[in-house]
Image (tube, helix red, strand yellow):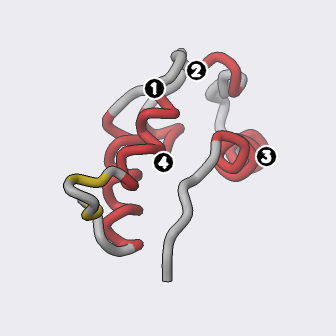
Amino acid sequence: MKTKPVSINEVEYTAHSLAVEFMTWNEPIPPFGSRFPNILESCLKVPFQTFHRKHLYHHLTGKAAILFFLMVKIILFRMATREWLL
């Protein structure tokens, strides 16, 4: 089964909306528009990179693992902590 790339709108809906709704401790959540330009977009493209027409990350688990790693490793939002991203 072929996996399709994740869009910015899907990330905003799932991650940001759920964080705003369910985070109960007193840590401010920055608005989705406060992210650094093009950083999130490049993180979302990495799992679907190819080299000589072969995917670098073959299965869904590999794609999910590298996406999770990049989302935690690279601070995507201003005023964000790694705990907020988890």
In the picture, measured across the screen, residue 2 lies left or right of residue 48, that is right
Name the residue furthest front: 52
Alpha carbon separation for disc pair 4 and 3: 14 Å
Comparing 69 with 25, the one in front is 69
Q: Which mark is residue 21?
A: 3
As shown in the figure, which amino acid type bears the numbered disc 3? Glu
> What amino acid does circle 4 point to?
Leu
Q: Which residue is mark 2?
A: 35
Callout 4 touching callout 1 (CB < 8 Å): no
For disc 4, the marked residue is 86
Residue located 45% across and 26% down the image: 39
Eye-nearest disc, 4 or 2: 2
Task: Determine crowd level at label 3: few under 14, some 14-19, many 20+ residues with C-alpha closer than 10 A.
Answer: few
Left or right: residue 64 compared with residue 17: left
Q: Are marks 3 and 2 in contact (CB under 8 Å)?
A: no
Which numbered disc covers residue 39? 1
Residue 5 appears in which quarter of the rendering? bottom right
Q: Amino acid at mark 1?
A: Ile
Q: Residue at x 32, y 54 (%)?
A: 66
Q: Nearer the viewer, residue 85 or 65?
A: 65
Q: Residue furthest bottom?
A: 1
What residue is drawn where x is 43% and y is 34%?
42
User: Which of pointers 4 and 2 lies earlier in the amino acid sequence?
Assistant: 2
| SS under mark 1 | helix
Q: Pointer 2 and pointer 1: residues touching (CB < 8 Å)?
A: yes
**Residue 24 visible in the picture:** no
Q: CA distance from mark 1 to mark 3?
A: 24 Å
Mark sitting earlier along the chain (3/2): 3
